[in-house]
Amino acid sequence: MPKYLYHGTYVGDGVKGLIKDGGSGRVAAVREAAESIGGSLESFYFSFGKDDFHVIVDLPDNVSAAAMALTVAGSGRVSLDTTVLLTPEEVDAAVRKHPDYTPPGS
């Protein structure tokens, strides 16, 4: 199953919700959301710096990943970025492909 990294920050009432629910409450909410669309939560970490959290989930496909991102970001309480994660085997397969390509200005 494909893996996706969500990372971002809590904004406005999202910070208040984190304080109210605690870290465990947010983990439970993300686990429930992933499972509701056929996926699972692999890891959830909070962090200092630009991002407040880093979440890795296994989801069935890009449509499911987009649905999760739209739902979370649509709450207005989280600013979110999504990254599709590739396995080493997928990168191996990618480097064996050689698309025909002409760079700009060539």
Image: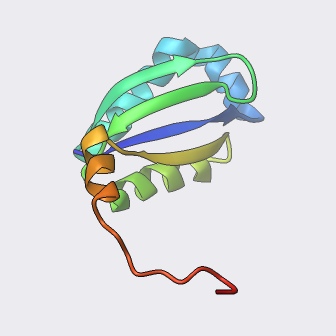
Q: Is residue 55 above or below residue 60?
A: above
Protein image colouring: rainbow
Q: Is residue 42 above or below residue 72?
A: above
- Measuring from the top left, give residue 93's x and y in whole percent: 25, 54
Q: Residue at x 24, y 51 (%)?
A: 60
Q: Quadrant of residue 17?
A: top right
Quick one: 53 or 77, which is closer to the camera? 53
Q: Is residue 53 above or below residue 82?
A: above
- Measuring from the top left, give residue 95's x and y in whole percent: 34, 56
Q: Is residue 29 above or below residue 2?
A: above
- Measuring from the top left, give residue 1's x and y in whole percent: 21, 44
Q: Residue at x 51, y 18 (%)?
A: 45
Residue found at the very far front of the displayed protein: 106
> Would you say residue 72 is visible in this rendering?
no
> Would you say residue 41 is visible in this rendering?
yes
Q: State which quarter of the image contains the C terminus.
A: bottom right
Quick one: 100 or 78, which is closer to the camera? 100
Q: Residue at x 75, y 29 (%)?
A: 50
Q: How many marks?
A: 0
Q: Is residue 103 left or right of residue 83?
A: right
- Measuring from the top left, give residue 7's x and y in whole percent: 58, 36
Q: Residue at x 50, y 46 (%)?
A: 83
Q: Is residue 106 left or right of residue 72?
A: right
Q: Quadrant of residue 102?
A: bottom right
